[in-house]
Image (cartoon, rainbow, N blue to C red):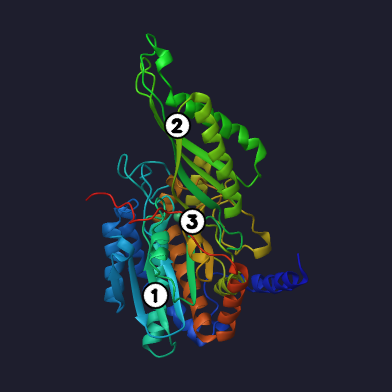
Amino acid sequence: MTSASRVTALALAALLTLSAAGPGARAADLNPVKQAAVAAVDNHRDELIALSNQIWAYAETALQEKRSSRALADYATAQGFVVQSGVADLPTAFVASYGTGHPIIGILGEYDALPGISQKAQPVQEPLVAGGAGHGCGHNLFGAGSIGAAVAIKELIASGRLRGTIRFYGTPAEEAVGGKIYMARAGLFSDLDAMLAWHPSDKPQADVTGSQALVDFIVEFKGRAAHAAADPWNGRSAVDGLELFTHGLNMLREHVKPTVRMHYVIQEAGIVPNVVPDRAKLWCWVRDKDRPGVEAVLQRLRDIAAGSALMAGVEAQVTIQGGDWELLVNRPGARLLQENMALLGDLPFTAEEQEFAKAIQKATGVAEVGLVTRLRPIEEQVFEGGSTDVGDISWLVPTLHLSVTTAPYEAPWHAWPVVACGGMSIGHKGLVYAAKTLAATMTDLFTRPDVLAGIQAEFRSQSQGVTWKPYIPDGPPPIPAP
Ligand SMILES: [Zn+2]
């Protein structure tokens, strides 16, 4: 720990002591513009919760989010934003803008669900729709909370208390494809001064641990079919190639950094045993804490694919489908978020909500500690696995990212507990808290040019010499047929 961050730790400790005084905004600690921003979120609270519930019930998966996207875009239009839909060749993406000139502050919203995890808003596992999708990553809250913050800033610009532009980005397909990457490639973030985003979580914090870089690729093997008993010498098995590849990949695990994650599924591996299979296909993701780490492992796997093909007498082809850059952490930005979270105090969960959370923790076999209400100090954060297409944006524009409690501590993510809490008051309180933090933080970016300049200087020094190049292939996004 450097001496500078020790000073920050002391300052944070002081702020945390203040925040322990009780739930809700400490009006006395908020300047008048911040008070107005927080009050605006409260004024729209019921609408934001209704929007979130609507998107929760739609539970539309990646690139299918037509009604969810429409609900948010219509709300933005009704609030006076200029809305441009279908940006970057993504039918469910949109940009909602208000105001003119700089600073131009962006805020991200997501709204895609995950297949197969439909769940009622109750602490006992039971699907709302059998086999249906569910918001197991809380993106219904993410979209509604972010638009709430954007509306608060819009009202301050409209009343002349802030000058500049607020822009809400409706970003589809975070759970597959990565809609933001196509939006970035289309240049939609190029004139921004700063970007903000939050994510539902099991704890509140201004994130400084980043996310993992990821590459998503297919390995295909092509062999020669033959009768498996009558003339196997004429055959070359693509499945042999695939099995050698997975063996090589699994041996490689011993020789990679502890931060590397490799996961795959086998998509094609022959049809019947009495035909030597001429096709085999595997879908693989490799992650590490940063892109150079991912690239190094990818090169080893390319060699392993070539070696496997040579041994099996077949051909191998590796095709990159997509991937995410790691999130570039902006520490001055994180400190600003942390200050604003501390001003807002603890998350105001009730005893009933804590019981709801504990019931889920009991059902999922994790410690029954309930919901985390207290802001986590920056110095206590630990790196967790996972990737996001927000990472790519963070290399193009300074990005401030926070997490807010919307689910029980350490209960399974991308699973029914998150869906359950996202459809009731636990998720709603997280949504409102996130909207207030984001709105309050944005007022600083609009009114304190020195703070914004510090965030931008940090971004320039961290990203110097790096040219963003997306993992996605050339051409339009893979939109499913209607
Ligand atoms: Zn998510």
Q: Measure the C-alpha gap from mark 2 to mark 1.
A: 48 Å
Location of the N terminus (image quadrant): bottom right
Which residue reaches farthest left?
A: 482
The type of residue carrying mark 2 is Glu
The type of residue carrying mark 3 is Thr
Label 1–label 3 contact, CB within 8 A? no
Left-right relation of 307 to 105: right
Label 1 within 8 A of ligand 1 by Cβ = no
| Secondary structure under the numbered disc 3 in the rendered image | loop
Left-right relation of 86 to 382: left
Residue with the mark numbered 2: 315
Label 3 within 8 A of ligand 1 by Cβ = yes
The type of residue carrying mark 1 is Arg
Residue 30, placed above or below residue 359: below
Residue 365 appears in view: no
Q: Position of residue 261 (x, y in %)?
A: 57, 43
Residue with the mark numbered 3: 388
Numbered disc total: 3
Q: Measure the C-alpha gap from mark 3 to mark 2.
A: 33 Å
Q: Measure the C-alpha gap from mark 1 to mark 3.
A: 20 Å
Residue 413, placed above or below residue 34: above
Residue with the mark numbered 1: 167
| Viewer-proximal residue among 242 and 135 | 242
